[in-house]
Image (cartoon, rainbow, N blue to C red):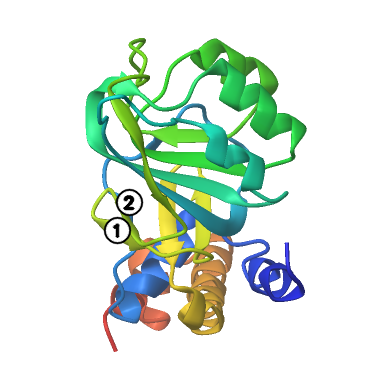
Amino acid sequence: MSPQDKELVALFEGLDTPGVSDALDKLGLPGQCLGVMPLDNYRQVVVGPAYTVRYVTASYPPGTVGDFIDDVAEGDVVVIDNDGRTDCTVWGDIMTQYAGSKRIAATVIDGVCRDVSKALGDGYPLFSKGRFMRTGKDRVEVASVNQPVSIGQARVCARDIVIADANGVVIVPRDRAHEVASCARSIEEVESRIRALIAEGKSLKEARTALGYHTLQRKS
């Protein structure tokens, strides 16, 4: 991971996907990956730069499926666009084992995965649209890497910042990372103050009204 990648990842330390999602809404940015869910109720938040991969229907003879992973750097998040297909998988136990050994941060798939017991047992963070056992070999092939892809209606470019946790996945455009992180922290600060007022005995309505809760995520 480059020094700039590390700097951008550090911006989101202590934040989660709900907070970043609220910041995206306030700034009028898309980025929530619709329908892409965590394999497990992860306690940690994953943050890393995107290594994007796009799959297409296989040619004849069929091309490669998973060799791209040799080029993924430690700390990257593999982001796979399989066009939302649920009839064949593009990630299984061998990929999980290899990704873990390379200290890849996580995998996000617009499509399905398999061999989930391996990912669950290893604690490898995996986010997809479901599970299905049928292989993608000879059915799909890699068309491009590190080109723009679509994940749950969100556009992801190479090295955009991926934030993923038990709530789902959001994508922050690389050139807006400072702005989004700052906005998310401002929103979280207000929400923290609301929680403090409630702990002091204020009603929910009083606390929210005092600190403008209902306009926190409203587009500026």
Q: Position of residue 28 (x, y in %)?
A: 28, 79
Q: Which structural element holds mark 2?
A: loop
Q: Position of residue 88 (x, y in %)?
A: 29, 20
**Mark 2 surroundings: few (<14), some (14-19) or many (≥20) residues within 10 A:** many
Residue situated furthest front in the rendering: 61
Picture disc at residue 33: 2
Q: Position of residue 40 (x, y in %)?
A: 51, 27
Q: Nearer the viewer, residue 69 or 152?
A: 69
Residue displayed at 48% across by 63% down: 158
Q: Nearer the viewer, residue 139 or 52?
A: 139
Q: Classify 171 as above or below 133.
A: below
Q: Is residue 176 left or right of residue 7?
A: left
Q: Position of residue 110 (x, y in %)?
A: 32, 40
**Mark 1 surroundings: few (<14), some (14-19) or many (≥20) residues within 10 A:** some
Mark 1 near mark 2, Cβ–Cβ under 8 Å? yes
Q: Is residue 131 left or right of residue 64?
A: left
Q: CA distance from mark 1 to mark 2?
A: 5 Å
Q: Which amino acid does the dot numbered 1 rest on?
A: Ala
Q: Where does the N terminus fall, quadrant-wise?
A: bottom right
Q: Decide which of tag 1 and tag 2 comes sooner along the chain.
A: 2
Q: Quadrant of residue 172?
A: bottom left
Q: Which amino acid does the dot numbered 2 rest on?
A: Cys
Observer able to see residue 44: no
Residue displayed at 50% across by 84% down: 179
Residue with the mark numbered 1 = 154
The mark tally for this picture is 2
Observer able to see residue 51: yes
Q: Where does the C terminus fall, quadrant-wise?
A: bottom left
Q: Classify 162 as above or below 78.
A: below
